[in-house]
Image: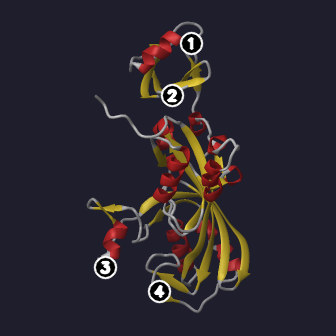
Amino acid sequence: MARRKKGEAISGWVIVDKPLGPTSSDVVNRVRRAFNAQKAGHAGTLDPLATGILPVALGEATKTVPFILDAAKSYRFTMRFGAETSTDDAEGEVTVESAHRPTDGEIEAVFPRFRGMIEQVPPAFSAVKVDGERAYARARAGEEVELAARSVEIHEIALVSRPDADHAELEISCSKGTYVRSLARDLARALGSAAHVSALRRTRHGPFREEAAIPLDKLCALGHIAPAPGPRVHLLPLETALDDIPAQAVSGEDAARLRKGQGVLLRGRDAPILSGSVLATHRGDPVALTEYRQGELRPVRVFNLVN
């Protein structure tokens, strides 16, 4: 007999405004407890010193996490000039110092060098794996960590404010895999200075935006306030993560076939023009993520939603 899973079979997305301090895993665990959900996961790690959007998937929504991991992101961050650190943020030890404080004009003048596809070396204190081990684990053990450069894309970069000569607040939109700490480090070096990230906030992650996020403490408190509707009022449908994927309605018979892992033919004069990933739905409910090839929907991820 299969062991019964603890919690409820709740599925959907919760867009959390992560506070300063907890890890992304801490946030996921608190959200899962707040909903009493059987299963939960996040789509894209935020460092403990970072705040902002952390999409948390519950139940069957965890099957859509890969589509969010690949999505573009936006960040607002503060560079502190004068010192480069071992972690490229305020947590590390100072490794390089500089008395040079670039002007607004100098900062904006180097932006073209960092727009588009660039090569970027991740921080030594990062989750990148080296021979099967996280780079930060090796770095914390005192090992010399050398990481290879990787290609990332910076879609937009702008100087937002200049509180004082030591600080510059920037905003960027970028591809997955971009390290803001590395970008700040490399920007400062290009300016003949040294800097690290002193504040970092994610403001957008794919279809999820800052204004739709709920602070973690507020979300968790909803479970203790009666007769409020509880945290479920902030639960978004799992298909929210699939906004860019075409949907195709199927019959009840075809939905049953897909749920069994069988393909469904869509041929004839009225067959839709589709390609690639397609979300199959029945009566508005998601049935499966499919791949459309040669007139057939082939199930890739099947959703087992509990009504």
State which tag comes first along the sequence, 2 or 4: 4
Q: Nearer the viewer, mark 4 or mark 1?
A: 4
The numbered disc on residue 94 is 4
Q: Nearer the viewer, mark 2 or mark 4?
A: 2
Q: Measure how far apart labels 4 and 1 are at the Cα level.
A: 63 Å
Q: Measure how far apart labels 1 and 2 are at the Cα level.
A: 27 Å
280 or 220, which is in the foreground? 220
Residue drawn 62% across the image and 66% down it: 112
The secondary element bearing badge 4 is classed as: strand
The numbered disc on residue 142 is 3
Query: Given contact means CB atoms under 8 Å apart, are the residues at marks 3 and 2 in contact?
Result: no
Q: Which amino acid does label 1 sit on?
A: Ala
State which tag comes first along the sequence, 3 or 2: 3
Q: Measure how far apart labels 1 and 3 are at the Cα level.
A: 61 Å
Q: Mark 1 points at which residue?
A: 271
Residue drawn 67% across the image and 72% down it: 169
